[in-house]
Image: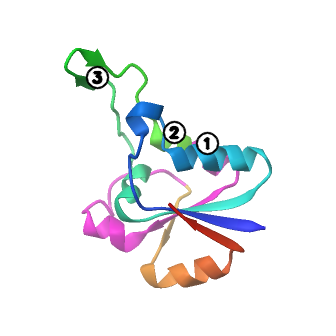
């Protein structure tokens, strides 16, 4: 069974958990042998940009001592042979289509999403 994980909501739980819950789940499932792909759309397309750093984040007297490293987590998924897709139009809409991004990420046109879904047995939208 091949499953496509779709993430649209970005930075959910990333400060409390130091990672994105679904990216963490994807790592866990891949480590258990699942055949997975990941598609980022909506605000989650920001995840592939280089140089995001929450180091130094403070709320009052509280310091975030373990900031999230979403780009690093995605790189580790890529290294585990998880294909990562990003919707080009969502990047363009945010003005980040030409910003440096994680290598090995596949840009996909919105019109290509149905074919990507068809190539998977299951689609999970988060």
- The magenta-colored residue range is 74-103
For marks 2 and 3, the one nearer the N-term is: 3
Residue at disc 2, secondary structure = helix
Q: Which mark is residue 72?
A: 2
Alpha carbon distance from label 1 to label 2: 6 Å
- Relative vertical location of residue 56 with respect to residue 15 in this rendering, above or below: above
- Is 41 positioned to the left or the right of 1 in the image? left
Mark 3 highlights which residue? 56
- Disc 2 or disc 3, which is closer to the eye? 3
Q: Measuring from the top left, give residue 24's x and y in whole percent.
A: 58, 43
Give the answer, above or below, for where 9 lies relative to 19.
Answer: below
In the image, what residue occupies the spot 47% across and 43% down?
71
Lower position in the chain sequence, tag 1 or tag 3: 3
Going by the image, does 54 lie left or right of 7? left
Residue 21: image location, x then y, percent: 52, 45
* Tag 2 and tag 3, C-beta contact below 8 Å: no
Q: Which mark is residue 76?
A: 1
Relative to 33, is 87 on the left or the right?
left
Q: Is residue 99 magenta?
A: yes
**Crowd band around label 3 with a 10 angstrom C-alpha radius: few (<14), some (14–19), many (20+):** few
User: Is 69 located above or below residue 102 in the figure?
Assistant: above
Q: CA distance from mark 1 to mark 3?
A: 24 Å
Q: Is residue 84 magenta?
A: yes
Q: CA distance from mark 2 to mark 3?
A: 18 Å
**Which label lies toward us, 1 or 3?**
3
């Amino acid at each position: 069974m091949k499953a496509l994980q779709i993430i649209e909501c970005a930075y959910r739980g990333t400060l409390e958990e130091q990672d994105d819950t679904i990216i963490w789940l994807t790592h866990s499932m891949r480590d258990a042998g699942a055949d997975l792909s990941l598609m980022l759309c909506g605000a989650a397309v920001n995840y592939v940009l280089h140089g995001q750093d929450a180091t130094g984040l403070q709320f009052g007297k509280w310091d975030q001592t373990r900031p999230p490293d979403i780009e690093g987590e995605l790189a580790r998924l890529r290294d585990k042979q998880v294909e990562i897709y990003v919707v080009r139009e969502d990047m363009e809409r945010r003005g980040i289509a030409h910003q440096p991004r994680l290598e090995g990420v596949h840009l996909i046109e919105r019109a290509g999403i149905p074919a990507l879904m068809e190539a998977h047995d299951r689609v999970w939208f988060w």
